[in-house]
Amino acid sequence: MFGRHGDQCRPNYISMKLKAFWRDVRFLQMLAQAVFVVLLALVAGYLYVNVTANLARQGLTVGYGFMKNPASFDIGESYIPYQASDSYQRALTVGLVNTLVVSVVGILLTTVVGVLAGIARLSSNWLINKFAAAYVGVIRNTPLILQLMFWYFGVIIQLPSVKQAIELPGSIYLTNRGIYLPWAEATETFPAWRNYLIAALLSIVIIWILFRAVQQRSSLPTPFWWNLAYLIVPALTVWLGAAIQPESPLKPFLPALVGLNFKGGLRLTPEFAALLFGLVLYTGAFIAEIVRAGILAVSRGQAEAARSLGLTTGQTLRLIVLPQALRVIIPPLTSQYLNLAKNSSLAIAIGYPDLFSIAGTVFNQTGAAIEIIMVMMLSYLSMSLLTSLIMNIYNNRVRLVER
Amino acid sequence: MAAVDLRPPRLVIGPLAWLRKNLFSTWYNALLTFGALWLLYSIVNPALTWSLTEARWGVIEANLTLFMIGQYPREELWRIWLVIDWLAALIGLSWGIWRNAARGFAVIALSAGAAFALICIGLEWDAWINWLVADAVLLTFFLLGRYLPYASRVTTVGWLLFFPGLFLLVAGSKAIPALPAVEMGAWGGLLLTLLLTIVGNFGSLPLGILLALGRRSNLPIVKYFCIGYIEIIRGVPLVTILYMADILLPLFLPVDVRPDRVIRAMVGFILFEAAYQAENVRGGLQSINRGQYEAAQALGLNGTLTTAFIILPQALRAVVPALFNSFISLFKDTSLVAIIGLFDILKIGRSVLAQSDWLGTHREVYLFAFIIYWGFNLAFTYGNRRVEEALGVGKR
C-alpha cells in the first residue's frame, strides 16, 4: 500500500540505474528490511546474553533431560494411566489430555447452550427474551475466573454430603464429592453392535451418493417417497443385527449409594464439573450473541421470498435462512471455540489438573522455566491451529461462492 | 359480494393485550412462559432468602477498604481521593465543553458519587464527605467548563497530564518529600485492577498500531514477523503470557535488574493486548477507501505522511467501538493476575476468606466481586454508547 511509488518509478528506472540508487524504492525497501533484521538480531543477542548470565548465576542448564525423571506428585484425575513414579513427560501428557477432554466436551455443550440462548434472545415471548438477555448481559460482563471460583467454592463444594445427596430425576446425584450421572456399560455383544450401527450409518451415506448420482444424470429432483430409503435401509440393517445378536449391547449403569459413597454411573469430580459448567455458560453467552447476529443478518426479504415461492416454514429455515446465517456465524464461532480451549487454562484457580496447572507444578519442582513455557505455548498453539484448520475447512464449504 | 359479519377486533392495547401478545400468543409460548416463570421462581426465591437471612454481608463491610485499595498505606489515602477529585474535575470540564458526548459519563460519575456517599452514611463512615466533595468538584468544573474561555485547551492538557499524574500520585517518589514512595507490592484491590487496565490498554495501543501497520506492509520480513507475533500471542491463553512475563522477564533482563511483579504483569498485559489491538486497528485500516491513499499521493504526500495524517486518524476513529470493547475485556482479564499472585480483588477475596472470622463466606465475597465488575462494565458500556451516539462513530 505504501510503496506504490515503486510501480510509477519503473519507466524511468533504467535511465537512473546507476545514479541515485538511494532514491530507488526497491533499494530502500531492502535497506529497511536489513535494518529491521539487524535490530531484531541485536535485541535477540542482548536477551541471549542476559539469559546465559542469569542461568549461569542460578546454576541452571537448558535442556529436556529432566523430562524423563520421575514426577513424584499425584494428579487428582487422569484419563490415561498415571502414577507418581511416572516421568514428568507423562505428567504433562496427562495434563494435555485433561485439557483436551474438558475442551471437547465443553465445545459440544456450549454450542447447544449458545444456540438455544441465541434463539431465545430472538423469541417473541417477552419473558424468554428478557431471560436470555439477562443471562448474556451478566455472564459477558464478569470475568470467567470469578465465575469459575463462584461455581466451585460457592456452589459445588457447598453441596450436601454424599449421605444427603440432592437427587434429580433420572438418577442424577449432586454431592460435594462430585456429580453422579447415569451411564451405560458395554456388554459382550457391544463390538458386534457397533459394526451394525456403522453399517447402518454407512448405508445412509451410500444412499445419498446414489440419489445424487441419479439426480445429476436425469436432472430431475428425486421423488419424495424415495427418501424413505434413508429410514428403511438403516432400520433393516439394525433389525437384522438384533435378529442375530438378541442380547442388548449396553446395560444401564446407574449410580447407587453403597456404604459411604456412590458406586457406578459416571462421576464428574467437583473440579471438572465446576470448570465445565463455568466454561459452557461463559462461552455460551458469547455464542448466543453470535447466533443472534447471524440470524438477524439474513434479511427478512429472503424468508419472505422463500415463502412466496411456496417453501414450507421448515424448508425456508433449512434451505434459505440457515445456510446464509451460518456464513456469518462460523468465523466468530471458531474464535469462541478457541477461546474456550484457551480459557480452560483458568482451571488452575479451582484445582483441576489441566496442562497449565501441571506445567506450573513441574516448573516449581524443576525450575526449568524456558523449557516448560515452550512446551506449554507449543501445546496451546497447536491446539489453536488445529481447531482453526478444521473450522476453516468447514467455513470454506459454507461460505459464499462469488461469481 | 355479500356482506361478511366480522367479529369485533381483539383487544390491542392495555395490559391484557400486552400479556396475550407477548407471553401467551400460542400454546407453546404459554408453556414457555410458565416454564420461565418456574425457573425464575426457583432461582430468585432461594437467592433472596439466602441473601436476606443467611448471608453474612459483614465480611464486605469489614474489609471494604482492603477490597478497594489493598495494602495501600492508609495515611496516604488522601492521594487516592485527590486522583478521584482530579478525575471528577476533568469529567465536569468535559461535560461543560462537549455536552452530549460526555454527558453519559458525567451522569454516571455523579450518581455513583451520590450512591457511594449514601452507602457511607448508612454505614456511618466518614468517607461520605469525600464523595460529596467529588460530586461538588464535578459540578463546579461543569460550570467552569461552560463559561470559562480556553476551557477546552485546559481540559485537553488536563487529560493528557492525568495519566502520568495518576501514577506520580499513586506511586509517589523519593524525590518529593510530600509524596513518599509507596512500593508496588502494596497496590491492591480495585486500585490495582484499574491501574493494570489503564496501563494495559494505553500502553499496548502504540505497539498495536505498529504491528497493524507492519502486518499490512509490503516488506516481507516485517510483514511475516508481525503476522507471526500476532498469531502466536492470539493462539495462547493470556495466563501463559502472564506466567511467562512473571518468570521469564527477570531471566531476559540484566542480572541486577529485577522489576517488581506489578511491572512484570503490566509488561505481560501490554505484550498480550498489543496483538489484539493490532487486529482492531487492522480492521480500521482495511475500512479506509483506496481513494484516500490516491488523493494523498496526488497531493504529494509520501508514505509516512499519508499514514500519519490521512490514514491513521480515520482508521482509529473507525475502530473506537472495538477499542472500547478491548478496554472492557481487558478490565475483566486483569483478574487473572490473581493466578500469578498479585493482590487484585479476587486474591484479596481469597485472603479475606482465610481470616478466621469469615470462614465459609465464599458466596458473599464472590458476589461482591461480581457486582463490582458488572457495575463497572455496565456503567462504562452506557457512557461509551452515549459518546458514540454523540460523535456518530460508525455512522459518519
Image (spheres, coloured by chain):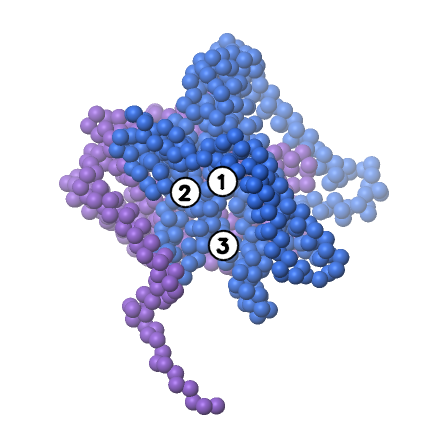
User: The chain drawn purple is chain what?
Assistant: B
Please say whether residue A252 is visible from this viewpoint. Answer: yes
Q: CA distance from mark 3 to mark 2?
A: 19 Å
Residue B205 position within the rendered picture, expressed as x and y whole percent measured from the top left: 50, 40
User: The chain drawn blue is chain what?
Assistant: A
Q: Residue at x 25, y 44 (%)?
A: B47
Q: Amino acid at mark 3?
A: Ala
Earlier in the chain: of badge 1 and badge 3, it is: 1
Q: In which chain is the residue bearing label 1?
A: A
Q: Are marks 1 and 2 in contact (CB under 8 Å)?
A: no
Residue B275 position within the rendered picture, expressed as x and y whole percent measured from the top left: 53, 37
Q: CA distance from mark 1 to mark 2?
A: 11 Å
Nearer-the-camera pick, A266 or B121: A266
Quarter holding residue A164 = top left
Q: CA distance from mark 1 to mark 3?
A: 20 Å
Q: Residue at x 35, y 58 (%)?
A: B31
Question: Which residue corresponds to mark 2?
Answer: A281
Question: Which residue corresponds to mark 1?
Answer: A107
Q: Residues within 10 Å of mark 2 (few under 14, many from 20)?
A: many
Q: Residue at x 83, y 39 (%)?
A: A17
Earlier in the chain: of badge 3 and badge 2, it is: 2
Secondary structure under badge 2?
helix
Q: In the figure, A367 relative to B318: above or below?
A: above
Judge left or right: residue A76 versus residue A209.
Answer: left
Question: Which residue corresponds to mark 3?
Answer: A293
Q: In which chain is the residue bearing label 2?
A: A
Total numbered labels = 3
Q: Are marks 1 and 3 in contact (CB under 8 Å)?
A: no
